[in-house]
Image (tube, rainbow, N blue to C red):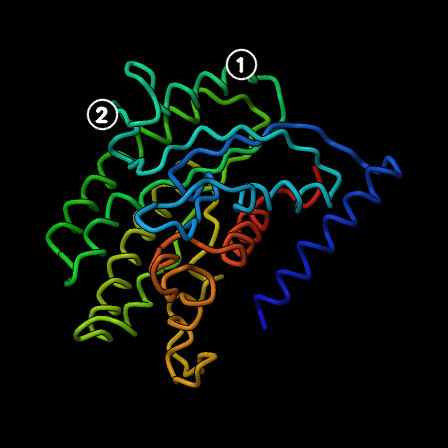
Amino acid sequence: MAVVVVLALVSGVVMRGAILRAAGVGSTSGFYLVVGASSSLGFQPTGIPHHNGARTDHGYANDVLALEAAKGVDLTMRQVGCPGETVVSMLGAGDHCYTLPNRQMLAATAFLRAHASDVGVVTIDLGFNDVRPCLTTPIVDVACAEAGLAGVRADIAPVLRELRAAAGPHVHFVGVLYGDPFLADYLRRESSPAQAALTLRIMSELNATLAAAYAAHNIPSANVPGAFESDNQAPSRLPDGRVVPVDVARACALTWMCHTYPWGPDDHPDDAGYRVIAGAIVAKLPSVW
């Protein structure tokens, strides 16, 4: 039911935004800089065998534009993200999307400096890939995850400092926390409930680390795990009749993890999942600009 409500909300706000613009009501213009990895680009699987997906225009960034348009805020989007980007790679290791010495951080800070006098929004979607490889193995690799978390703890603050220093005084930052798509492993792994619980423990530690860093830099955190109900153990029923915890059902409904090959399992959000993420982001933006 929650997903249906979100679907209705997004379609409704697009219409309301069009009405507001036509009436000339309270329009504000600004930019939206989207920093992050594949989810920041709206990646979803293509259904093509052996193909790992493609960026879409149905990601949370697109939904943020629609939701803000409903408030009379006209944002121009700039996406600088790179699939596979980690907190660690942001600080100098580089990535496959840019040719060194260029990298995502330089693209983001250059954009912010060029728009220092403008109103804008920056979302930061980093950290998931620092632990993701450890959660996709047949058995969760705890040592790998601890190393990934250590990297996030060491490097997220410098990332935030650089972005903050480059931004002008009229920029609203939001840090994106993460729902746990790997809760869907409850349905498919050996010792599945225990493995799913372990992924939740690791993802919760990642979110706590990120939230503390964002708070230290006066950046609000989008409560995506709360919106995904990633720690709700109440019983729920899947469409096929199986009874599972709510958090498992939500992981299935809002990501591609419970789809079969060649669509899944894939840990990217689906359209509904991206809309939920967008709602959590917009909840941290000003109600009136």
Q: Position of residue 134 (x, y in %)?
A: 19, 52
- Residue at 21% across, 71% down: 189
* Closest to the observer, 228 or 283: 228
- Residue at 73% across, 48% down: 14
**Image quadrant of residue 154?**
top left
In the rendering, which numbered label is found on residue 114?
1
* Closest to the observer, 236 or 261: 261
Within-10-Å neighbours for mark 1: few <14, some 14–19, many 20+:
few
- Residue type beneath disc 1: Ala
Disc 2: which residue = 93
**Image quadrant of residue 51?**
top left
Quadrant location of the C terminus in the rendered image: top right
Quadrant location of the N terminus in the rendered image: bottom right
Left or right: 119 in relation to 54: right
* 3D distance between C-alphas at marks 2 and 1: 24 Å
Q: Position of residue 245 (x, y in %)?
A: 38, 78
* Closest to the observer, 28 or 54: 54
**Image quadrant of residue 213?**
top left
* Closest to the observer, 79 or 208: 79
Classify mark 2: helix, strand or loop: loop
- Residue at 55% across, 46% down: 58
Within-10-Å neighbours for mark 2: few <14, some 14–19, many 20+:
few
Classify mark 1: helix, strand or loop: helix
Q: Residue furthest left?
A: 143
Q: Position of residue 49 (x, y in %)?
A: 34, 51
Left or right: 211 in relation to 188: right
Above or below, comparing residue 147 to residue 106 in the picture: below
- Residue type beneath disc 2: Ala
Q: Residue furthest right?
A: 23
